[in-house]
Amino acid sequence: MNALRSLRLLMLAVLALVPAVQAAQAAQAAQATATAQVVPTFAMEVRIDPASRLLQGEGTWTVPPGVALELTLDRRFRLESIIVDGRPRPLPPDGTAAAGTARHRVSIAATPTRSQSWQFRWRGELAPLDGGIDHRGVIGALPPMASIRGSYLPAGSAWYPEADVPATFRIQVTVPAGQHAVVPGRLLSESTEGKETRAAFDTPLPTEGLTLMAGPYRIDERMLALPGGRKVRLRTWFTEALQPLAQDYLAAAAGYIERYDREIGNYAFDGFSIVSSPLPTGFGLPGATYIGEAVLRLPFMRGQSLAHEVLHNWWGNGVRVDWRRGNWSEGLTTLMADHALRMAQSPEAGRQMRWGWLRDFAAVAPGTDTPLDRFTARTHGAASAVGYGKSAMLFHMVRAEIGEAAFNEALRDLWRSHAGQAAGWRDLQAAFEKRAGRPLAGLIAPMLSGTGAPMLVPQSIRHDATRGGLVVTFAEPVPYSYALPVAAWHGERAEPALLPVRRGERSAVLPLQDGRVPDALQVDPDFAAWRRLGPGESPPLLRDAMLAPDIRVLVASDGDDSWRLAAGELATRMLEAQRPPTARIADLDAAAPLLVIGRHEDIERLVRRDPRLARPAALARMPDATLWATRAANGAPRVLVSVEDTAALIDLHRRAPHYGAQGHVGFRNGRAIASGIGNIETPKVPVTP
């Protein structure tokens, strides 16, 4: 398997963007029929025993004329037979495994005038479920795993003879009674007979790989009626402990599907499944989402993150990502789901989310980000800040530039033209430009290909009567063309305006419509543009230290083995750096970022030594566990973790990693009772007469 194919399959495992769209309109259905005639199909039957982790499979690849395939199968499985057009074929020698891939390879050459039938039988032992894997581990290339707690066979892991081109699938899965299996796609049948449960699925349109999930699920279901007589089967596949949440999740999913069906276009699947996972996952699948059991219990999952996963059925799974040109789907989904829900709460909540995108990027070490058109998946914090935050901000800027109506119509156009197909950034740009009626390359191109972010705090602002306005000069050329929002201050009153900056220029003129010269300007006070934050705009966040590659860990309290192990485990789960070095008290004055863990009394002793470490007033009541971010005198980030006892420290293991975007958070009885960030002040720059 070549490097590009390996990377693409890894991305499938990361995001599980496995497109299997069922066309909802007649034109899409016709397109699906036509497409199925020119792509290979794989019909298979798979039997899985989670207790023994044994998988047995057999299936037939039907290869159309003129199509060549390169098949790979993980070497944990043994190929038992290959039959080509009814005739046995010798099994490939062991040497056909590509170096370093640990996979069998079978090459199928194209035949110009006839179809081919390749039948395979294989069996082998799946990997044991890794119960200790953390949130970082699941975004790597996971092997196919099985356990009675749950089985996960991700696309890209070659748990069946996997092709290097999109294909359509039909699969029947047999598992022991008490277990249920689900594959993203259309549910064809399900039954339990004796000691076995069977289910069959298909994918009406081509997909690049197939994911299979199984577990001791209790299935809840409701039917959603959409306009035009369309029916959508909504299901939860939850463990017994989670089943009380099922109806709330079904209701939330129904609301999101109705919303995006109305805003974008017809929902393209006949169902949507929410599948619980024993892993700390959060994957969007076509017509499904696979979410960690612990995450499903968190309130933000149903109220915000579920919307993100539902929307992936339009962006990412409906209109697929053209991986060669970068992954645009995460940014668009973040804007239309997460940001839209925040804006529904209040404009200030939306402003804080946009500020968070900029603040996340500020925590990325200079020079370590990559261009947006090279982002594929969230493999680390820097990639997340680009692929989610920068991408979402670009879409936000495009919407502000062309207007909300044109933006929404462009996305509806994209859905109508590309549902069931792949799209790249150029396709999105073309859709926006068509509705805008003008080129947008001055905004979009530099955002896609550039790195870093401009500093947009003006060096000077002077009134120039001959030019009819204020000449605003920046320290460096602006990298994109954009109508930059500003606030013109007249005494205590601010008036909104737009400053037309142009790519490659350091200066821009703000027209004065009524001739009144303001006292000062704030540039981008609502954080509506991609830029570096200025003075006063960057209060410390937990993420500053969590993402720092050179962070050290100071355990400020003595304790027994359980205390030391709990502190070490918390550092492992919170920090992106692997095996950070141990720090000493003297390192509180050093320039390196620092994570400090201790009991309340020991943390208070450090605060008396250095008042800059003091907890925020919101945490003054000292709950069971508190985390807050601050900075040393030299500006180095500090995160302090103050707990009542070892039990409170252990309780933070699964909670703390989710609060990186906060400046502080306090927990009592396992619940967050206080969280927030410091004051955010965009600088006012005086106007020179």
Image (cartoon, grey):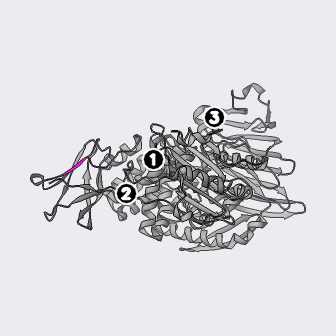
Q: How packed is label 2: few (under 14 Cα within 10 Å), some, or many (20 or more)?
A: many
Horizontal and vertical percent position of residue 436: 31, 57
Which label number is shown at residue 261? none
* Quadrant including the N terminus: top right
The amino acid marked with disc number 3 is Thr
Dot 3 falls on a residue whose secondary structure is loop
Q: Is residue 307 above or below residue 136?
A: below
Which callout, 1 or 3, points at the residue further toward the start of the chain? 3
Which callout, 1 or 2, points at the residue further toward the start of the chain? 1
Q: CA distance from mark 1 to mark 3?
A: 54 Å
Residue 208 can be seen in this image? no
In magenta, the rendered stretch is: 457-463
Horizontal and vertical percent position of residue 373: 45, 42
Q: In the image shown, does 526 or 408 lie closer to the viewer?
A: 526
Q: Is residue 97 above or below residue 643?
A: above
Picture residue at 83% right of the left edge, 42% below the top: 125
Badge 2 is on which residue? Answer: 528
Badge 1 is on which residue? Answer: 362
Dot 1 falls on a residue whose secondary structure is helix
Badge 3 is on which residue? Answer: 111
Q: Splitting the image into 4 quarters, where does residue 235 fall?
A: bottom right
Side of 117 relative to 404 (left or right): right
The amino acid marked with disc number 1 is Ala
Q: Nearer the viewer, mark 2 or mark 3?
A: 2
